[in-house]
Image (cartoon, rainbow, N blue to C red):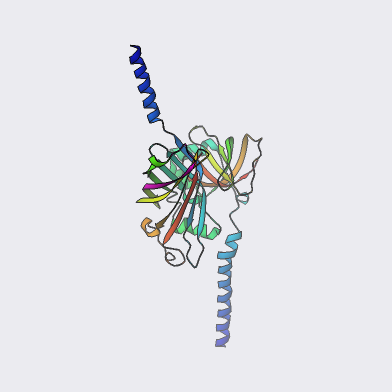
Amino acid sequence: MMNKATLVLFLVTFSFSLHAQKLFSTKTGQIRFNASSPLEQIAAINNQVDSKMIDKTGQIVFSVLIKSFKFENQLMEDHFNENYLESSKIPKADFKGFISNIASVNFAKDGKYPAVFIGTLTIHGVQQKVSTTGDVIIADGTPSISGVFKIKLADYGIVGSYIGGKIANEAEVTVNCKYQ
Amino acid sequence: MKSKISLIIFVLAFAAAIGVWYYAFKYSVTNHRDVANENAIIVSASQIVKDFQTNETKANKTYLNKVIQLKGEVLKKDQDQAGNYTLTLKSDDPFSSVFCTLKKGVKLSNKDSTITIKGVCEGFLSDVVLNDGVIVK
């Protein structure tokens, strides 16, 4: 009888520790956008990125508001919102997916772990399957995500006569999110 | 006579080109939108969260890109990765608040627990998001 109780207790504890997972989140992640061409510097920064990540499953979500992208040039910011991303109609963009090799990240040990991100990127209301690489960085027990990838503006229905000329065909997106 | 007219046209076109260039590349870099000078929609933190939760499309039409002034109880003060101060204001829903990033250089004092702020509404994620915030009171 006593043994059975010990066994049950053991199983319960074991299964709990097996399923214990942690949700990391931030509301102040950073994403930079750069579509500069040799003719024009076109860059913006968003310091209000909402992101959540689960350590065990590698599930990860980034959500941004298009209006949170700030340009040095106000007119450029207005054009970005009104003519290209149409942020009044489509205010958000997001990425939903997984870090496929999350098992190789040791959240208890500080270090830089290469990561593969696979998921769906939705910009301008258009969904595209994407996969890219980056890093999970653990510093003082707190994880951060960093990564750089390129998106083809035409793939997301972002069109305009300047694209391919003053505006690059491909925009570089730099992610740097520190979780809390 | 004809050459005089073409000279005038040339001078006007040149002046216009300079004007456009100045507006696009000089004026627009130094002159950013300033919330302090704009009329604001006055609303409570609880109400704006409720409006976005009930009908986001409608709330976007009402609030998006507009200057909002609201009074609320401070839940959290923090700094973002670029060093700007951020404020989270309480609503009736514990899972959704108003999140406001203050304008560069605007600082927070420690004592305020209830605050009135003014900022530009950028939309709704898990919170209603404001940016370029300034403290009214």
Q: Which of the 4 image quarters holds residue A18?
A: top left
Q: Magenta part mainly helix, strand or loop?
A: strand
Q: Can residue A33 be seen from the camera position used here?
A: yes
- Which residue is more in the foreground, B90 or A98? A98
Residue with the most extreme top position: A1
- Residue that appears at 56% across and 68% down: B21
Where A16 sits versus B33, above or below? above
Image vertical order of residue A79 relative to residue B127, above or below = below
**What is the total number of numbered labels drawn onto the structure image?**
0
Q: x%, y% of residue B129?
A: 51, 43
Q: Is residue A35 magenta?
A: no
* Magenta highlight range: A106-119
The residue that appears at 47% across and 66% down in the rendered structure is A166
Q: Position of residue A68 (x, y in %)?
A: 51, 50
The answer to whether residue A126 shows anywhere in this view is: no
Of residue A88 and residue B113, the one placed in the foreground of this image is B113
- Residue B90 horizontal/vertical position (percent): 55, 34
Image coords of residue A81 (percent x, y): 47, 55
Quadrant in which the N terminus of chain A appears: top left
Q: Residue at x 46, y 60 (%)?
A: A35
Q: Residue at x 37, y 25 (%)?
A: A14
- The one of A40 and A136 positioned closer to us in this rendering: A136
